């Protein structure tokens, strides 16, 4: 404000016009900026306003051209700093937009894959149940067979079904005999080989 008092009316008009142009420019670019970017731009803008005001005053008073030249350089460098900062912010915004699009695409692909896997799982489950029918397993044997395929031990199956481990072993033996396999590993492999074909 001290600098403005020492200016004549015409010089004050130039300073006010320059400040209005700078403020309009800053308002337009600061809409989606981070706080630290806004603070840096404001600091550079203050340097521009102070030096531009002093520059206009010095020209009116006929100061040394070296001093005036340094103020011009300071204003230009500050303005160039703002331009570079805005360019970096635009590039960062474009990168963020690109990353957001990639994340959205990855989420979409993941959801599609999840749906496909669910569908494949349902189809494979149907296939397993059909095979249990072909082997003539009873409902109880089907339940034990499914749990065997999930990898639980006889003891865990017995606890899960509230039966004795001996009963589960007998049911497993019946399942192996009906499916014409020698044991648990061959029983699981029978279905696993089906998946690899």
Image (spheres, helix red, strand yellow):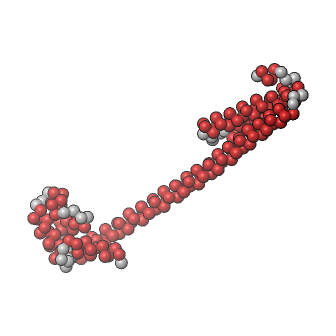
Q: Is residue 146 left or right of residue 168?
A: right
Q: Position of residue 14 (x, y in %)?
A: 84, 30
Seen from the viewer's position, the closer of residues 141 and 18 is 18
Q: Is residue 95 left or right of residue 29?
A: left
Number of marks in the image? 0
Q: Position of residue 75 (x, y in %)?
A: 77, 36
Q: Position of residue 18 (x, y in %)?
A: 80, 33
The residue at the point 16 percent across, 57 percent down is 159
Q: Relative to 119, does residue 98 appear above or below in the rendering?
A: above
Q: Relative to 102, does residue 131 appear above or below in the rendering?
A: below
The residue at the point 83 percent across, 36 percent down is 69
Residue 178 in view: no
Which quarter of the rendering shows the C terminus?
A: bottom left
Q: Relative to 117, does residue 39 appear above or below in the rendering?
A: above
Q: Is residue 92 left or right of residue 174?
A: right
Q: Quadrant of residue 84?
A: top right
Which quarter of the rendering shows the N terminus?
A: top right
Q: Is residue 170 left or right of residue 93?
A: left
The residue at the point 28 percent across, 71 percent down is 128
Residue 111 in view: yes
Seen from the viewer's position, the closer of residues 134 and 103 is 103
Seen from the viewer's position, the closer of residues 63 and 76 is 63
Seen from the viewer's position, the closer of residues 170 and 12 is 12
Q: Quadrant of residue 42?
A: top right
Q: Quadrant of residue 165?
A: bottom left
The residue at the point 33 percent across, 70 percent down is 124
């Amino acid at each position: 404000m001290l600098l403005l008092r020492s200016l004549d009316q015409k010089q004050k008009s130039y300073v006010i016009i320059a400040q209005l142009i700078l403020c309009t420019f800053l308002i337009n670019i600061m809409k989606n900026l981070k706080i630290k970017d806004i603070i840096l731009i404001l600091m550079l803008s203050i340097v521009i306003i102070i030096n531009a005001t002093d520059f206009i005053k010095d020209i009116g008073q006929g100061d040394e051209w070296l001093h005036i030249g340094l103020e011009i350089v300071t204003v230009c460098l500050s303005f160039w700093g703002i331009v570079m900062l805005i360019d970096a912010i635009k590039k960062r915004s474009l990168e963020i937009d690109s990353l957001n699009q990639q994340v959205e695409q990855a989420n979409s692909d993941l959801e599609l894959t999840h749906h496909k896997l669910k569908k494949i799982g349902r189809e494979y489950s149907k296939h397993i149940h059909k095979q249990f029918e072909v082997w003539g397993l009873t409902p109880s044997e089907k339940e034990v067979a499914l749990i065997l395929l999930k990898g639980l031990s006889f003891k865990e199956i017995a606890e899960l079904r509230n039966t004795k481990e001996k009963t589960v072993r007998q049911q497993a033996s019946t399942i192996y005999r009906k499916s014409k396999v020698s044991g648990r590993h061959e029983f699981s492999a029978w279905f696993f080989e089906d998946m690899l074909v």
